[in-house]
């Protein structure tokens, strides 16, 4: 039994069947990629995992616990963090503050009234945040207003915000989109290091096959809201159904 | 110092100095000069500066940090005032119990209002708070007349029980609001040459509380709690997906700002022992919004500046009348003098709202960060020469200055 189990999940938007009978079983401590053409329902699936959307039918179980019906902050506190397709960061705050917030969420839980001591005096949290920023090569920018960052930097920052929580399950929605080649490679290295250094399961959605084949141990191909195949990267590469899904798309 | 970083400690010292020296700073013109009407250093106005300063500081903790725009904070001020006057009627004319109860009652009331209003955000939140405040106003004005005195409001009477005062025999004479025997209305006058300065007990009691309120707000701004409130304003969704429950954070901010409003309401009663329902009218709620925005919402000192600015206008500009104007321009040739008077007249006296409105528009359009941004720009002009390399960035990187 995997750490994340998705059973018979369906989601309709009006007349559009965005997800149709999705079944997924993601094993603990693996990197599982989900690929598929634009509009296949990949982001919608992640939305159903983090409490952003409620599926019409089906069930989602994480670590043996039901996920559906919980609030987003409760799901995160269970150990699921997500990097969004378009960066979701605190644009009005500095880079450092962006990383401090998840640090406090990790240490103090969903709410703690901590209104008198200064942030600067929380040395343990400050250290963790600085260490994280140096891991993603952003320490030099820690006092920069994060709204002013480039798109690639925003992504790296968002990844740092998720990683600093040491989640059990990390959901990455196209984490290298909009990044320069060098930054993409750095991101691959960073994710590999994280993976090697601790227990973590990753679900990664990517269009960049270089990233997918560098990281993934299993790959699910999603097309029109339904998983076509799930297999190892080697088998997926030559799979006729996969070629059909992608090539059919390209030819149309 | 006091657990503050250096720039904050400097700011606090600055505020302490200004409030202590206010009787001098606000009376810069000799008593008999033509400019004397611009002197603001009389007790009633100075008390308003600091009391509304407290109101605005508290409002800013909610609006400036979380971005939730309450249009009903005057209700908490009013509730604080009613609680304070009842304390004076029932227990003692000493202002301390009155002030304490005003903070507690306003806190409890804001807990209820906040719990319900915060189910919504944006414009719906604002409308809910407005609805609550107008309901409170109507209740105070009519339905609850036995408790609030309705149209006439409440004042201490000689027939009040004042249990503690009777027990200890204190506070007797006419029953005046006092701080352990010090009459709030006592003033010491000091004349130096043509100048005269007033030092009023009530003002200094309120000033000390404002300094304390300001200090507490600095601590809140710099705390993890303050950081969470700024996270609410910046991206509440991201905050929730980061494992933080934004609701109790916003509710705590709402209650804290309600307690500040209650403190201000209690102090108003401590200075001038009467309350009327108009204190809760929606225009009073709107005024504190103007104070925060005019001074600079989300900045530490801005709301205090905004409160001072608006109260000064309300009390000084509104008192300039036509004959004063004619006095100013008497030296000009007749036609020109009449012309000047005719042009300026609509903006003074009862027209002070017009002037304030225009100023408000200018500030919002050209200085979105309020008077504080104006100050920063002026300071930057002077600082430009020595070090020019990080002009725009540094102002952005320190949003809560
Ligand atoms: N909230 C929504 N309301 C209505 N339709 C939606 C909503 N979210 C997604 N959709 C639709 O559902 C389908 C799947 O969208 P989704 O974003 O999941 O695709 P995707 O696989 O992530 O694509 P991409 O690779 O472009 O990110 C699309 O047709 C999209 O327009
Ligand atoms: Mg997507």
Image (cartoon, coloured by chain):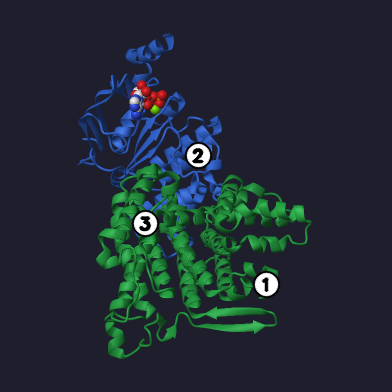
* Chain identifier, colour green: B
The residues bearing labels 2 and 3 have C-alpha atoms spaced at a distance of 31 Å
Residue placed at 38% from the left, 54% from the top? B72
B371 lies above or below A65: below
Say yes or no: labels 2 and 3 on the same chain.
no
Left or right position of B161 against B259: left
* Chain identifier, colour blue: A
Residue placed at 54% from the left, 61% from the top? B314
Q: Is tag 3's residue or tag 1's residue first in the polypeptide sequence?
A: 1
Answer whether residue B248 is visible to the viewer in this image: no
Say yes or no: labels 3 and 1 on the same chain.
yes
Task: Give the percent coordinates (x, y) of residue B192.
Answer: 67, 83
Tag 3, which chain? B
Nearest the camera: A51 or A209?
A51
Tag 2, which chain? A
Q: Quadrant of the C terminus of chain B?
A: bottom right
Q: Secondary structure at mark 2?
A: helix
Residue position for label 2: A154
């Amino acid at each position: 039994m995997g750490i994340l189990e998705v059973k018979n999940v369906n989601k309709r938007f009006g007349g559009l069947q965005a997800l149709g009978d999705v079944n997924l079983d993601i094993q603990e401590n693996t990197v599982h990629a989900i690929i598929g053409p634009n509009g296949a329902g990949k982001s919608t699936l992640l939305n159903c995992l983090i409490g952003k959307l409620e599926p019409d039918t089906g069930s989602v179980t994480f670590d043996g616990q039901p996920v559906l019906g919980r609030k987003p902050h409760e799901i995160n506190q269970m150990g699921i963090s997500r990097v969004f397709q378009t960066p979701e960061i605190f644009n009005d705050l500095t880079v450092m503050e962006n990383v401090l917030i998840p640090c406090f969420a990790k240490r103090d839980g969903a709410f703690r009234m901590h209104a008198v001591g200064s942030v600067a005096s929380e040395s343990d949290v400050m250290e963790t945040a600085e260490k994280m920023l140096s891991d993603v090569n952003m320490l030099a920018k820690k006092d920069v207003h994060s709204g002013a960052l480039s798109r690639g930097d925003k992504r790296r920052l968002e990844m740092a915000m998720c990683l600093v929580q040491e989640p059990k399950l990390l959901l990455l929605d196209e984490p290298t989109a909009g990044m320069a080649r060098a930054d993409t490679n750095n991101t691959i290295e960073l994710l590999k290091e994280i993976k090697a250094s601790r227990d973590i399961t990753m679900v990664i959605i990517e269009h960049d096959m270089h990233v997918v084949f560098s990281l993934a141990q299993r790959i699910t191909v999603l097309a029109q809201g339904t998983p076509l195949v799930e297999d190892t990267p080697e088998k997926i590469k030559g799979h006729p159904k996969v070629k059909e899904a992608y090539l059919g798309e390209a030819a149309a | 110092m006091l657990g503050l970083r250096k720039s904050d400690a400097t700011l606090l010292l600055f505020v302490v100095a200004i409030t202590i020296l206010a009787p001098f700073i606000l009376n810069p013109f000799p008593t008999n000069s033509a400019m004397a009407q611009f002197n603001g250093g009389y007790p009633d106005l100075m008390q308003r500066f600091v009391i509304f300063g407290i109101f605005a500081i508290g409002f800013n903790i909610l609006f400036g940090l979380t971005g939730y725009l309450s249009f009903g904070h005057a209700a908490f001020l009013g509730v604080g005032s009613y609680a304070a006057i009842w304390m004076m009627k029932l227990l003692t004319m000493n202002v301390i119990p009155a002030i304490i109860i005003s903070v507690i009652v306003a806190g409890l009331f804001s807990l209820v209002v906040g719990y319900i209003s915060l189910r919504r955000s944006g414009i719906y939140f604002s409308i809910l708070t407005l609805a609550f405040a107008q309901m409170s106003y109507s209740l105070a004005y009519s339905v609850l007349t036995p408790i609030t005195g309705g149209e006439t409001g409440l004042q201490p009477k000689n027939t009040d029980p004042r249990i503690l005062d009777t027990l200890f025999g204190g506070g007797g004479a006419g029953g005046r609001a006092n701080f352990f025997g010090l009459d709030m209305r006592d003033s010491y006058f000091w004349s130096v040459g043509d100048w005269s300065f007033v030092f009023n007990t009530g003002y200094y009691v309120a000033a000390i509380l404002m300094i304390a309120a300001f200090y507490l707000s600095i601590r809140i701004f710099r705390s993890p709690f303050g950081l969470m409130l700024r996270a609410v304003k910046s991206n509440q969704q991201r905050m929730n997906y980061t494992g933080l429950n934004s609701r109790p954070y916003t509710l705590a901010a709402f209650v804290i700002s309600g307690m500040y409003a209650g403190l201000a309401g209690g102090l108003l009663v401590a200075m001038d022992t009467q309350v009327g329902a108009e204190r809760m009218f929606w225009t009073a709620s709107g005024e504190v919004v103007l104070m925060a925005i005019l001074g600079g919402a989300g900045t530490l000192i801005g709301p205090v500046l905004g409160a001072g600015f608006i109260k000064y206008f309300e009390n000084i500009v509104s008192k300039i009348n036509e004959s004063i104007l004619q006095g100013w321009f008497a030296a000009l040739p007749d036609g020109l003098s009449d012309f000047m008077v005719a042009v300026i007249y609509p903006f003074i006296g009862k027209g002070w709202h017009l002037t304030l409105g225009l100023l408000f528009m200018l500030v919002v359009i050209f200085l979105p960060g309020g008077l504080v941004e104006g100050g920063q720009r002026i300071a930057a002009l002077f600082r430009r020469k020595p070090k020019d390399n990080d002009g725009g960035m540094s102002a952005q990187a320190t949003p809560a200055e």
